[in-house]
Image (spheres, grey):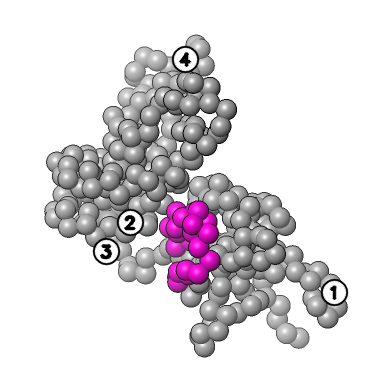
Amino acid sequence: MAKQGTKSQLIKTFDLGEELKFNIRKKGNVFGEITRPRRNQETQEKYEARTYVSSLLWQSLKMEFVQVQFWLTQENYNEKKLLTDNVLLGLSYFMDKVYISLEVINKEGEKNLKRSINIPEGAWQSLVVQAAVIDELMPRPCNKRKADNDTETKPIKLFKRVVEKEDGSLETGNWQNMPERIFLKEMLNDGKKANLTMSQMNFSKPTVKDVILYVMTFLIHREILEGVSDVCEACDIQDPSQDHHDCLTPMEEHLFASFEPALVKVMENSSEVKQCVFKLTKLFKLPSIKDIQNLQENIDQEALKSSIAWPNEHQQAINDILSD
């Protein structure tokens, strides 16, 4: 009797709409899959087609969110980009609908129709919105180089205290890198024990590139926000046309318009970049980083745009740390 393969365990399902789902599954390792219903042309029976999403492909896909948004804005159906796992990313247009296509290419260079997928624009936007939550469940790509010792693989734990005030607002402390028992002792000795809680954030040990990306994301995002006016002139004059209301402009459009000048301005202010890098290396107890300017110039700008537009909880924590 042939031995049956073990089935994967479903961890969580994210509904993307239009009958598409993004599932997190586990079979040895955790992986993702995009599922959509299809019909067998011979029997007319419905079945669920699956597109496998490895941790590497997921990270690669996230980095292209900004690029896809740009293609959608420009209605660019000609350009394609090769991602990891031999997947071609692009746009397609069929029967008055726009799709984001993931074309899986086999070893012979041909499109694998069974594994490829066309994601309707609405379902894609739903995937982008839910990406931060998906990201917390998807594993990081494995580093095959064995660590020199066990401390390399241990997470860095940051803690901060949170106090709920009488009016319901929260007063938060600064993120600190110290043993949990010491943090708890200091927190309890603070004298504000009522409505006092602790928040924890686990980081993998940041690489040099991680630190530079964290810092550049924070500084460029701050620069872009400073250029966005809090006052909408169209609202002040009660302009009925929505075309002139800056308050309705999506953040992604501000990013496209302001990214380049903001990047130039941050690159010119090398002293502030160095101060932020020093602050993070001190917090994470990392060796000092040299040749920061060269690392800045060689940063992946698409990864930078993605991190600015859709920051995960780690980048949000870094933004808090560097804002203090």
Residue 264: x and y, percent?
Answer: 23, 48
Q: Nearer the viewer, residue 133 or 19?
A: 19
What residue is drawn where x is 48% and y is 26%? 234
Mark 4 vs mark 1: which is more N-terminal?
Answer: 1
Rendered position, 221 above or below 98: above
Give the left or right position of residue 72, taking residue 183 as reference: right
Give the residue at mark 2: 301
Taking 239 as reference, is 146 above or below it? below
State the extent of the magenta-drawn residues as a range. 60-85
Image depth: mark 2 or mark 3 in front: 2
Residue denoted by label 4: 165
Quadrant of residue 174 in the image? top left
**Residue at disc 3, secondary structure:** loop
Task: Decide: few, some or many residues near mark 3? Use Cα within 10 Å; few <14, some 14-19, many ≥20.
Answer: few
* Image location (x, y in percent) of residue 119: 62, 61
The residue under label 4 is which amino acid type? Lys
Residue designated by label 3: 148
**156 in relation to 76, above or below:** above
Name the residue tied to disc 1: 44
Q: Which residue reaches farthest bottom?
A: 108
- The amino acid type, in three-letter code, at marker 2 is Gln
Q: Residues within 10 Å of mark 2 (few under 14, many from 20)?
A: some
Q: Of the residues shown, which amino acid type is indicated by label 3?
A: Asp
